[in-house]
Amino acid sequence: MSAPRPTPAEKSGSAKTPPRSRIQRRNRQIILDAALDVFSTHGFRGATLDQIATQAGLSKPNLLYYFDSKDAIHRELLTRLLDTWLDPLRMLDARGDPHAEIMAYMRRKLQMSRDFPRESRLFANEILQGAPRMEPFIRNDLRALVDDKARLLQAWADGGRIARIDPYHLIFSIWSLTQHYADFAPQIAMIRGDGHDPLDGAEAFLEHLYTRLLAP
Amino acid sequence: MSAPRPTPAEKSGSAKTPPRSRIQRRNRQIILDAALDVFSTHGFRGATLDQIATQAGLSKPNLLYYFDSKDAIHRELLTRLLDTWLDPLRMLDARGDPHAEIMAYMRRKLQMSRDFPRESRLFANEILQGAPRMEPFIRNDLRALVDDKARLLQAWADGGRIARIDPYHLIFSIWSLTQHYADFAPQIAMIRGDGHDPLDGAEAFLEHLYTRLLAP
DNA sequence: ATCAAGTTTGACCAATCAGTCAAGAAGCTT
DNA sequence: AAGCTTCTTGACTGATTGGTCAAACTTGAT
């Protein structure tokens, strides 16, 4: 009749409570890091808890002491990703110089491919699967932001400050060209040679491309 | 002591023998079509034979009557894909007009995103997983072709017939921008609205982009 | 040192996985 | 219609999957 001992995962019912002890913070981080490796290369269905546990250097039951389920780990990774995924576009400033603003946005996205390639692949995997777990985020948050910034780009184009191009395709092109260096890194490495950094020359190329594309 | 009855999969030891009967050709095609659906959205590890069997409207043992294993189905899909994957780039003709040739290549790739989005996602999934089953193809066939065409693009640039841009990044940009419309179609659909065709305006945008990028 | 709380794990479970097999159903040739 | 081949499948297997649980081990405050 006694209440079962609560696990940390149970105690923090919502995503409100931050993990208490030092051990918890440390191990949750280790697990999420290992899970990011596995989910980003094999997708949700293709990843196994045993893989993640091995990668994390923990036992499987220990994983499930910190997270309720495989799904909970994946959800937590996506939640943390969304926080940072919108920021680069959000920073696109209506008061700045159009060309410089778009260029800076492109550079921020390219930097994310350099710094967070696993996160980029996690996102790519999610979209390839039809975005089952991100649909609300994309339909609401992301769409609203893109619509907003597309209006800004359109205004810049109408005002003759950048070339008259479709603002949605402009945004998609930046996503595509920058994320490609993270998502298709193995292919690029195999073609350019393994000693080569896939991102070598990418920034110069993209600066050239967008300078030419955007000139009114 | 009698030899076991051979299955069609066993009979055609190598990829030499074409399937004999009408039923075999038909069912192998049905299976490959269903498997393409499943593998392209869930990746190799995330796909199950039961999913493929259900999608194909066949029983699981029946699947394995036509193919030796899950791996054999996947291998056959990749093999068929490779045949058509190199063609668009192979057609880039040194004797043609540089601008028109590159533009036509871009259009061929965009058409493949329109006609074969599942094949594009199958390829993307394979690369995301580190290209374990395509490494030889990429390191040998694809790399040799890309090196060859990169030399051609470089010669065009050196001759002042197109802008002086890195030929490898030029090729990567075409892959990236065109495949994006297949691989990230769900995201584009959710942002632009479901009634919208993701590829609407894509060709005009890309023509504008490459016209500007390539001008000497 | 003690003791309660927090942490770890071996052993286990039901469900699902890829793949097998023998027997039956459907086609094809005569 | 007979007889042989090709095709199909229900019932199964051993391995792997996500997840549970009670017992044991650590840790930190007193």
Image (cartoon, coloured by chain):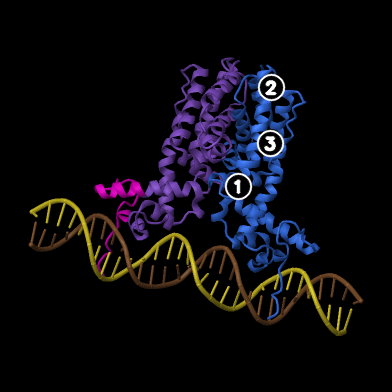
Chain colours: A purple, B blue, C brown, D yellow
Q: Quadrant of residue B138?
A: top right
Q: Are marks 2 and 1 on the same chain?
A: yes
Asked if residue B211 shows in the view, the reply is: no
Part of the protein shown in magenta: A1-30
Q: Earlier in the sequence, mark 2 or mark 1?
A: 1
Residue positioned 70% across, 64% down in the render: B9
* Element under disc 2: helix
Front position in the image: C3 or B76: B76
Residue topped by disc 1: B134
Question: Do the residues marked 3 and 2 share a common chain?
Answer: yes
Tag 1, which secondary structure?
loop
Badge number at residue A179:
none
Q: Nearer the viewer, mark 3 or mark 2?
A: 2
Work out whether residue C22 or residue A79 is closer to the camera in this orientation and state it: C22
Q: Position of residue B193 (x, y in %)?
A: 60, 38
State whether residue B116 is above or below residue B33: above
In the picture provided, is A73 more to the left or to the right than D11?
left
- Which quarter of the image is occupied by the C terminus of chain A? top right
Mark 1 or 3: in front is: 1
Crowding at dot 3, Cα within 10 Å, few <14 / some 14-19 / many 20+, comes out as many
Query: Which comes sooner in the sequence, label 1 or label 3?
Result: 3
Measured in 3D between alpha carbons, the distance from the residue under mark 3 to the one under mark 2, in whole angstroms, is 21 Å
> On the rendered image, what quadrant is the N terminus of chain A found in?
bottom left
Is A11 colored magenta in this rendering? yes
The residue beneath circle 3 is B109
* Chain letter belonging to callout 3: B
Spatial distance from mark 2 to mark 1, Cα to Cα?
31 Å
The image shows residue A210, relative to residue B196, as above or below, that is above
| Other residues around mark 2 within 10 Å, as few (<14) / some (14–19) / many (≥20) | many
Q: Nearer the viewer, residue B22 or A93?
A: B22
Three-letter code for the amino acid on which mark 2 is drawn: Trp
User: Residue at 43% across / 34% down in the picture?
Assistant: A115
